[in-house]
Every structure is written in C-alpha cells, then in structure tokens.
C-alpha cells in the first residue's frame, strides 16, 4: 500500500492560470519548515461549467512543477467523482475523492447487513478510544442501524475504487467522502464506517466526514467552534483506533472539506493535529478565482472594469448561478449592492468588499459568495477576461500566493 504525505492541501484553479503562484506558497512554506504537498483539484461540475477536461489540471500542475523545480510529491485530484463521472479523470489524476454522500440511507441487501453485524459482534459494549476520556457505548441494534444507513454507500465507494484500480496504471491515493449530506456523522458512526471501508477492501488514505456547522463557499465557518474542535478530535481518535483495529493504513488521515477560508476553526485544527501528531488533508486552500478578481480590481483601469462587469452580470443572473451551490451558500440578497453602486466604486472599495478580511468594516460576505459562483460569467467574457488577467498577472499572483501561504498553510500547519 502507498503512504501519502503527512500534510496535503488542495488548491483549486478555475482557469488553470495560477499554478505557479499556488506552488510558490508551498515552496515558501518549505523554507519555514513546513513540508506540505499540493493537491490540485477541479470538480466535474466546474469542468462542465467552463468546458475543460481533467487533463488540463494535470497539465497545469506538471507545468508549474517543472517551471519552479518542485521536488516534492504533488497530486491531481479527481474531485467528488462518481461511477458516472470518473472515467475522464482516471488517466490524469492520482488522487481520487470518492463521493458517496448521495447513497447514504440506501439499504444494502439483508445478507450484507447480517454479515457486517456478525463481524462486528465483538465491538458491542463499551469502546475506549485511546486519548479520550469519554467512552463510546454501542449496541447490536446500533451496529445494524449504522449498516442500514452507510453500508450501501461504502459498497458504492468500493465499486468506484475497483473500477479505478482496473483502469489506472501507477499508484494513486484514495479518499472516501461523506461530507455533502445534511447530518454530521458521530465518532461512533465514523468508527463503523471505517470498519465497512476495511471490509470492502478500499485502501483508504483520507476520509472526509460531515462536521456540524456550515461550510459555505469562500467564507468563514458558521457554527460552534468548540463543538467543531471536540468532533474533530474525536474523529482523529476514531481514525487512529480504526487503523489498528481493522488493518487500515497507519497514515490514515482526516480530510476537511472546508470550502476554503474557515479561519475561525484553523487554530482548533492546528492544536489537534499537533497534540496527536497526525496528518491532515484540507480540501481547499483559498479560492484562486476570487484572488484573480481581487487582483483585477486592485489593478484598476481595465481590470477594475472587468471586475465590475462580472458582478453586474452575476447579479442579473443570481438565481441561475446560485442554484447549483444552494446547499453551500448563505446569501442575503438584501445585502448585495446594486450594479449601479458597484459601478461607482474605485479599486479600494471593490477590493475591501471582496477580500475576506473579517476586521474590515467594508467586507461583504454576500458579495463575496456571489462572486465565488460567478466564474461562469468570466468564462463567457472570454478574451476580455483573460487579457485583463494577463495584464494583472503580477498583482494576481501575489494575492494567490499570500492567501494560500499566510491565511491557510501557516495557521493550519504552522508551529
């Protein structure tokens, strides 16, 4: 079995223009003693929106690595794939996020449920996870309930994994993702989900549970930070226990599908991984597309005009653009400025509204979330957008690098 690096951090790039700026952040982290591997990702939905193929992500990653002389591990993530979408990702990817959240609640056949319950009979009673004061108590009925809720989803993950294994040459990393669902999994549920994964024969490297609270796109965490920290530590303990108990990889790690910019929970994540000495994968570090728009606005002139045009068109198409992301957005339309107001902004006003600076009174989370889902508008602008981006490349690049390094890598993984 392959062993993935201890720390990995995802970076998305809607238009494959910021690879070198992104990689620079990881290289600067290395100079500060933080060894962390980049994982370039772009979802099937994003590819379909801007009419690209997964091979373009591999090309971007390889080009950045070659240009900057990166010598560490790096990955290209088949982001949130299913059996229906995986084939176009198989060749260029070496990290596969098996998204089976949609199958949670579907029942496996009775024989499979019976077999799992029988295999887990020795787990009935009190379970003590090393490092935690509270014990977990599980009954036979609990185990059957977990199997009825999650076993079919894990079996689907197994089907996806075996399809990749049969068609993929070379080593690859495997994540099982159950985060895009309504209810968070408890640590006890996580323990038995991992037992199912082990029995299914999936050599899982990372597992992405659903945590309590809101993980909206591109804005801070909404929820009880203390509760998140408790859940996060319990899940770390469950993974360490499960790795030994069920024969999973010792390097098995949690994956947090942050949606980027969850600044308020980064200190908690840092405390726990340092306390336990464990690895971590974070799905998204910053949103480079937003840093592009910030850079355009900062540049002024033509760049600012393009940034204003993106907002005006996005506002007019609010329902269309927001609908695919409805579960991970909380936009109050009443707090969105009119296109006319934004048209009168100078560079400073636009940047302050968009940049995720919680100490800035002008920061507007609703404005930011709308721009987050407006990349389709930029794609439709075509040469107008990309020409402006090229003219502002230095400013944009500085923003991308600073955002990933100083606002994500250092708070999560730094000393």
Image: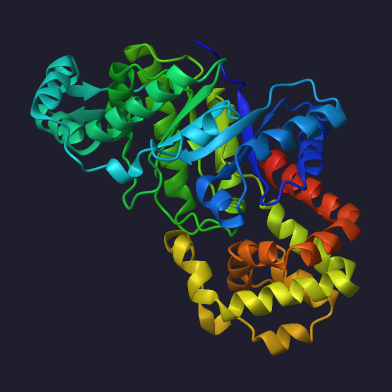
Q: Please tell me which residue lies in front, 60 or 198.
A: 60
Residue 362: image location, x then y, percent: 71, 75
The coloring applied to the image is rainbow
Q: Is residue 145 left or right of residue 133?
A: left
Provide residue 23's location: percent of width, then percent of height. Answer: 77, 36
Residue 294 seen anywhere in this rendered image of the structure: no
In this view, the residue in front, 268 or 103, is 103
Q: Quadrant of residue 133?
A: top left
Find residue 296 and report its image quarter. Answer: bottom right
Residue at x 57%, y 49% (from the top left corner): 47
Instruction: Report the label total.
Output: 0
Q: Residue at x 33, y 13 (%)?
A: 245
Residue 11 at x, y = what percent?
66, 42
Residue 377 appears anywhere in the view: yes
Please state the horizontal and vertical placement of residue 43, each as a whole percent of the image.
54, 45
In the displayed structure, would residue 375 be above or below residue 119? below
Q: Nearer the viewer, residue 388 or 153?
A: 388
Q: Is residue 347 above or below residue 4?
A: below
Q: Quadrant of the C terminus?
A: top right
Q: Residue at x 47, y 42 (%)?
A: 229
């Amino acid at each position: 079995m392959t062993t993935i690096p201890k720390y990995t951090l995802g970076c998305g790039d809607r238009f494959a223009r910021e690879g070198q700026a992104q990689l620079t952040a990881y290289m600067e982290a290395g100079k500060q003693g933080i060894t962390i591997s980049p994982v370039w990702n772009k979802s099937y939905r994003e590819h379909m929106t801007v009419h690209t193929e997964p091979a373009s992500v591999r090309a971007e990653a390889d080009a950045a690595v070659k240009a900057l002389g990166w010598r560490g591990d790096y990955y290209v993530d088949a982001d949130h794939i299913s059996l229906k979408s995986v084939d176009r990702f198989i060749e260029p990817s070496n990290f596969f996020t098996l998204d089976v959240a949609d199958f949670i609640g579907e029942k496996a056949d009775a024989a499979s449920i019976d077999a799992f319950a029988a295999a887990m009979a020795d787990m009935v009673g009190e379970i003590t996870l090393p490092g935690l004061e509270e014990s977990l108590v599980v009954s036979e009925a609990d185990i059957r309930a977990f199997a009825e809720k999650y076993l079919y989803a894990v079996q689907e993950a197994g089907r996806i994994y075996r399809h990749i294994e049969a068609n993929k040459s070379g080593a690859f990393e495997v994540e099982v993702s159950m985060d895009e669902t309504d209810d968070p999994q408890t640590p006890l549920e996580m323990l038995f989900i991992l037992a199912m994964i082990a029995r299914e024969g999936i050599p899982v490297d990372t597992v992405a549970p659903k945590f309590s609270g809101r993980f909206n796109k591109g804005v801070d965490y909404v929820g009880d930070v203390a509760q998140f920290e408790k859940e996060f530590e319990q899940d770390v303990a469950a993974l360490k226990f499960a790795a030994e108990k069920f024969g999973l990889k010792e390097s098995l790690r949690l994956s947090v599908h942050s949606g980027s910019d969850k600044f308020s929970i980064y200190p908690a994540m840092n405390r726990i991984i340092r306390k336990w000495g464990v690895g971590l994968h974070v799905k998204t570090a910053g949103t480079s597309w937003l840093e592009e728009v910030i850079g355009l606005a900062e540049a002024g002139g033509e760049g600012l005009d393009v940034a204003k045009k993106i907002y005006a068109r996005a506002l007019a198409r609010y329902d269309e653009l927001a609908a695919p992301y409805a579960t991970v957005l909380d936009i109050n339309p009443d707090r969105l400025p009119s296109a006319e107001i934004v048209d009168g902004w100078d560079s400073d006003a636009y940047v302050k509204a968009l940049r995720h600076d919680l100490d800035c009174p002008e920061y507007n989370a609703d404005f930011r979330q709308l721009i987050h889902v407006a990349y389709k508008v930029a794609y439709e602008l075509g040469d107008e957008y990309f020409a402006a981006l090229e003219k502002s490349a230095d400013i944009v690049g500085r923003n991308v690098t600073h955002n990933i390094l100083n606002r994500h890598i250092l708070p999560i993984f730094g000393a």
